[in-house]
Amino acid sequence: MQRLVRFVVEADGGSRGNPGPAGYGAVVLDPATGETLAERAEFIGVATNNVAEYKGLIAGLKAARELAPDAVVQVRMDSKLVVEQMSGRWKIKHPDMKPLAAEAATILPRSQVTYEWIPRERNKHADRLANEAMDAGKRGRQWEPSASSAALDASAARALATPPAGPPGDAAKGAAAVRAALASGAGASPRTPARAPALAEAGADTLFAEPEPGAPGRVPAPEEGRAQAVPAQPATPPAGGQGWGPDMGTPATFVLLRHGETALTPQKRFSGSGGADPELSPAGRRQAAAVAEALAARGTVQAIVSSPLRRCRETAQAVADRLGLKVTVEEGLREVDFGAWEGLTFAEVRERFPDDLQAWLDSPKAAPTGGGESFTAATRRISATRERLLAAHAGRTVLLVTHVTPVKILVRLALGAPPESLFRMELSAASLSAVAYYADGNASVRLLNDTSHLRQQP
């Protein structure tokens, strides 16, 4: 009896700019030993992350077919978008993705291929190949196998024996979805511009991404008509369905960036919109540069909106210069006016205005001394701002460069949390948070106070 041949294909792709200089990497492995059987990598010019990822998948499947056309192949990728689309669980809407998905679906018989999502740290081999290809392209050359150092380490080889966390993807179902998507796209318009709203779907596998809209795990919030994130619960599938809700379209994702440090930040002084308008400190400028690099690497931001205050505009401009975008100023993203407390530390306010401070801590309706803005008033302002921005940026990923209070209020409203939760969130300078908003009024908090991009900062 002929022995059944099995391969693992790991693939990845990247774009330095999204779109920008792009490349892919793919490796074919022996699942029993972890031995590398074939490597593929190529610099593909200017493209998006997802185009590069699909091209990596295609190259990996072709390499497996060259080794054994009757092999059973398990594809492992850290691109949630590609895995879910090729498994038939997510729709393929972006015109750049449809022909690539169709090509991938025809390389091997559908019954021979399954798909599994893996974390990025378990896809290092393909990731290194993709980066080697992009590095070669930067030098005006193509990747050469003899120059590659992307060897699979022993820990990654051992990880091959780890059972997948969930059910494998159904390649037959995925191929059927590809055909349906291509059929529905007949007569489609020419290639979508790189920064068009439809590109938001193409970034769905990144840190700020969400499962296909309508998936279990998001329920209406008790407040403000929005939603809180909750663990997914078993759902009863609708007749003829897979347990997924209606397609609500690509969510609008707000990436919330608190500005970099000013001279007042490390002193923990109240710094709102009613006092001085400080500039970024040298540390703040370094933080802005670091977050700009991190966002460029993630490659999903399509628009930048900033508070009118100087520290935010300077932070936003650093990111905009790196991403090649413009900054739009939105008055509604300004910080709360802290009245007579501006420039003071908490201890100084407690000493000078103890009763006013206690009232402010006890009730969101209380305003800082001297005509400041209460949290209740700020919530009305920021809610209205949120709705304007959602209407203007439906289905897009937008960077909002703002302050502590606006970020906390947006997160609080998305979670349906009480007003006192504002005092229970840590929000560091130049930190990133993210909230996705859906057409049905639901919202999902994706991230809070991420400062990983600052860990190398002095």
Image (cartoon, rainbow, N blue to C red):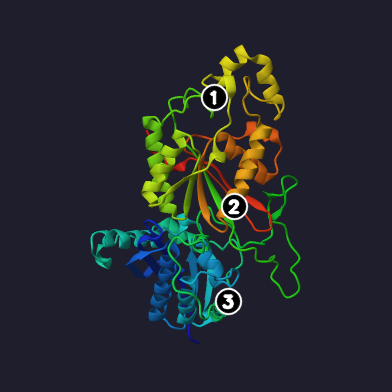
Give residue 193's mark.
none
In the visual, does 129 lie left or right of 116? Answer: left
Image depth: mark 3 or mark 2 in front: 2
Q: Nearer the viewer, residue 185 or 28?
A: 185
Furthest residue in direction left, as rendered:
140
- x then y, percent, for residue 383: 64, 43
Amino acid type assigned to the residue bearing label 1 in the image:
Phe
Answer yes or no: is residue 234 visible.
yes
Amino acid type assigned to the residue bearing label 3 in the image:
Ala
Q: Vertically, is 423 above or below 85?
A: above
- Label 1 vs 2, first from the N-terminus: 1
Identified at 56% across, 67% down, the residue is 84
Q: Quadrant of residue 133?
A: bottom left
Identified at 65% across, 38% down, the residue is 379
How dense is the environment of label 2, judged by Cα within 10 Å: few (below 14), some, or many (20 and up)?
many
Q: Vertically, is 267 above or below 217?
A: above
Image marks 3 and 2: residues in contact by CB distance under 8 Å: no
Image depth: mark 3 or mark 1 in front: 1
Judged from the image, the secondary structure of the residue bearing numbered disc 1 is loop
> Which residue is denoted by mark 2 in the rendering?
390
In the visual, does 92 lie left or right of 294? Answer: right
Q: Quadrant of residue 278?
A: top left
Q: Nearer the viewer, residue 364 or 113?
A: 364
> Which residue is denoted by mark 3 in the rendering?
177
- Label 3 vs 1, first from the N-terminus: 3
Identified at 65% across, 46% down, the residue is 414
* Quadrant of the drawing holding the C terminus: top left
Answer yes or no: is residue 457 visible.
no
- x then y, percent, for residue 340: 58, 19
CA separation in Å, label 1 and label 2: 30 Å
Judged from the image, the secondary structure of the residue bearing numbered disc 3 is helix
> Which residue is denoted by mark 1 in the rendering?
270
